[in-house]
Amino acid sequence: MNGRKEHNGGGSLHNIILVVLDGLGDRPCGELGGKTPLQAAFRPNLNSLMRNGQGGLLSPIAPGIRAGSDTSHLSLLGYDPQKFYTGRGPFEAMGLGMEVRGGDIAFRANFGTRDASGIITDRRAGRLSLGNDELARSLNMEIDGVRFMVKEGVEHRAALVMRGEGLSDKITDSDPHETGRAPHDVAPLSSEAEFTAKVLNKFLRVSRKVLDEHPVNVQRRKNGKPQGNELLLRGPGMVPKLTSFEEQHGMRAACVSAIPMISGIGGLLGMAVVKPEGATGTLESNFVSKLKEAARLSREYDFVLVNVKATDVAGHDGDALAKKNAIERIDEALGEMIRSLASETVLAVTGDHATPCSLKDHSGDPVPVVFSAPGILPDAAIFFDEFSAAAGMWRIRGLDVMNILKQMAGRSEKYGA
Ligand code: ZN
Ligand code: ZN
């Protein structure tokens, strides 16, 4: 295998696959007779992993903390979000498929409507969707050595990335956060941010002119629709400068995901980012193709992260049956993946947080986790679900996962003599 170094007194090094079923955890669902989707699902492969491996409950950040997918994945990959998470801006930008680099400043943005007197009359520009890509593209420009990149999201949503020397995220929003007021000038919150605020205000002035004259807005004006003529900025954050995964863990890594935000995190950490054919990040995604690709990559790379989004999607939809069905299809695909793995591969399956169907949002509940590795002592847990996992030996946080995996793979350094 690639890049194998001698650790563990000369024992062989195993490769690792970490499968993250997004939003996996759940609570009792009425439609499922009070079971969780995981409990209700036919899941022979997950159960077999649990029977033969070590299980437990995982708190993605810390007990009770409701994690986002971004903070949780950082944590699962061994990067403490309390040190490195700089706000939603950079991760929202990655989520729109923007390529960001450490040191860039990123904002969440809306296209809003500004009237002739300069007052914001609609913070969502009538939820415009047609032409939002053209509006975004028209704002890509360079001013005073700073590159401005805008990308549209769903409806009125967008993100702005600034790239250049000497930028700071210690600045205020331009979004007044309510209608009936003019957009704010961006103000520096510290002296190091003066240049950033100045060049950003210049950009906003130019962008108003560009957007006012843009054919999409001219047409909307004619049709009596609210124009998307003001880019409202909020939540600035500097893209964190993170040590690459290879430097941090001594492993060459690949990231298999159909979700731009997760792929973005993988890219930021220098992982090879792969989106297999048919993997869509939806309930209809091709789980077999995704997990087979992970198995293939695990022969080429020391570490493979796989994110499967469907479980989170069903949780947000509040659709317990869809979540159960997704888990059954994932379990089948997992079985195929496991059969094609090198026998010594270390495998973990867990969630990045719970997305209970009853809440349609992330909760702070712990999620089940299972570790499978050659030669490890099985524990008392025999089923993979939120309840049965409590019979397992582990009570861990997301940040512990890499340490456990590396130790099982013979890749950990001794702490002490
Ligand atoms: Zn998630
Ligand atoms: Zn979610």
Image (cartoon, helix red, strand yellow):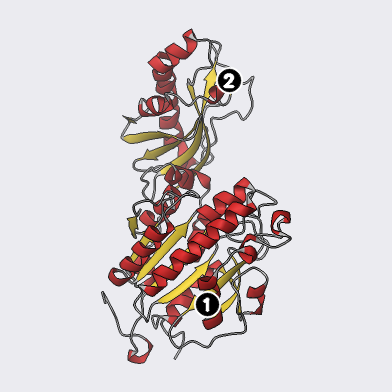
Classify the position of the C terminus by image quarter.
bottom left
The residue wearing badge 2 is: 120
x 34%, y 77%: residue? 342
The residue wearing badge 1 is: 48
Q: Measured from the top left, where is residue 219 in percent x and y?
A: 43, 12
Q: Measured from the top left, where is residue 316 in percent x and y?
A: 61, 48
Pick whichever, 416 or 127, lies toward us.
Answer: 127
Image height of 95 relative to 127, above or below: below
Q: Mark 2 packing: few (<14 Cα in 10 Å), some, or many (20+)?
A: many
Residue 313's tag is none
Residue 47 can be seen in this image: yes
In this view, the residue farthest toward the top is 222
Q: Measured from the top left, where is residue 337 in percent x and y?
A: 40, 69
Image height of 188 relative to 320, above or below: above
Amino acid bearing label 2: Ile
x 64%, y 53%: residue? 320
x 62%, y 21%: residue? 181
Q: Is residue 236 left or right of residue 409?
A: right
| Mark 1 C-beta to ligand 1 under 8 Å | no
Q: Measured from the top left, where is residue 222 in percent x and y?
A: 47, 8
Image height of 263 relative to 180, above or below: below
